[in-house]
Amino acid sequence: MSSNEYNKSNKTPADSRRALPTNPAPKKQPVKRKPKRKSSPAKRQRIAAVLILLLTLYLVISLLIGGFIYFSFNKTGKSGNIYSLRLYHAEKRTASFDSNTVNNTYGLYVPFTALSEICGLGIAGDDGTVIILLSPDGGTIECINNSSLVYINENAVRLSAPVLFEAEDYKIPIDLIESYLSGVEVNYDKTKMLCTVTAPEKSENITLKVQIPKEISKPYFPDEYKTYSETSDISQ
């Protein structure tokens, strides 16, 4: 056996693997990114038109809601009687207001500043509650902001309209003056649609009308209690 034949017959598997040719790894091709398409001018114009349309609708809806709230608050009362207002101290006119200024959805109101000038009223309180003071008798009217519940000398009464606290002044419903201020005259001229509020020359003549407490109902006791009271002997 020749040496070449011996070498071929004695090759190991490892030698065979080493003898196999090795192929180089394929090179990775760089990924080519597609360039972004620029939006056409026509598309940009459509988007801008849609945004403008949405903004316009938003503004229109906001104006409609705001107008509804404004007119619903400032519309006339249910009676439809819209009076202008004049205030007098004795026979001297002290203030005049047109109907748009002193009327709203609740009815006719009197600005407190003008009323206090002819009636000699004082006021104390905060943003939530104020107390109107009458001098010299010391009568009080406690008013709660945006509430028709008032306390006349600590007696609770319900007005037909709420007392309003506004930035420039307090608004007093005409019902409060008519029903609870004695000595102040309130008259209506339906021909001229004019309401006049006249205070006497001396503020001492203005008082609060006496509030008669409601009758207290008798207490209720169940029949079992009555039977027990009649049959029991407390002295035992």
Image: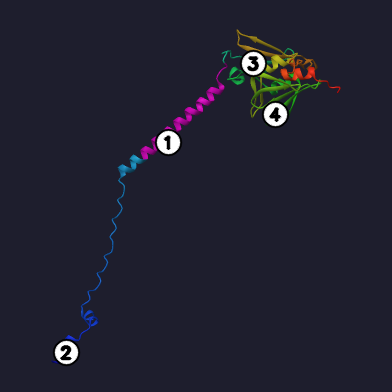
Which mark's residue is nearer the viewer, 1 or 4?
Answer: 4
Q: Is residue 68 magenta?
A: yes
Q: Mostly what secondary structure, the magenta segment?
A: helix
Check disc 1 and report its element: helix, strand or loop: helix
Q: Is residue 2 or residue 68 the one in the foreground?
A: 2
Please identify the quarter of the rendering in which residue 162 is found: top right
Q: Which mark is residue 6?
A: 2
CA separation, marks 4 and 2? 121 Å
Q: Which residues are magenta?
A: 48-77
Check disc 3 and report its element: helix, strand or loop: strand
Query: Image height check: is 189 above or below 31?
Result: above
Which mark's residue is nearer the viewer, 2 or 1?
Answer: 2
Q: Which residue position holds label 3?
A: 85
Of the residues shown, which amino acid type is indicated by label 4?
Thr
CA separation, marks 3 and 2? 136 Å
x 15%, y 89%: residue: 4
Please identify the quarter of the rendering in which residue 119 is found: top right
Q: Which mark is residue 129?
A: 4
* Residue farthest to the top, as pictured: 191
Q: Which mark is residue 55?
A: 1
Query: Image height check: is 210 above or below 8?
Result: above
CA separation, marks 3 and 1? 44 Å
Horizontal and vertical percent position of residue 88: 71, 15
Where, quadrant-wise, is the C terminus in this rendering?
top right
x 56%, y 22%: residue: 74
Check disc 2 and report its element: helix, strand or loop: helix
Horizontal and vertical percent position of residue 215: 74, 15
Horizontal and vertical percent position of residue 126: 70, 31
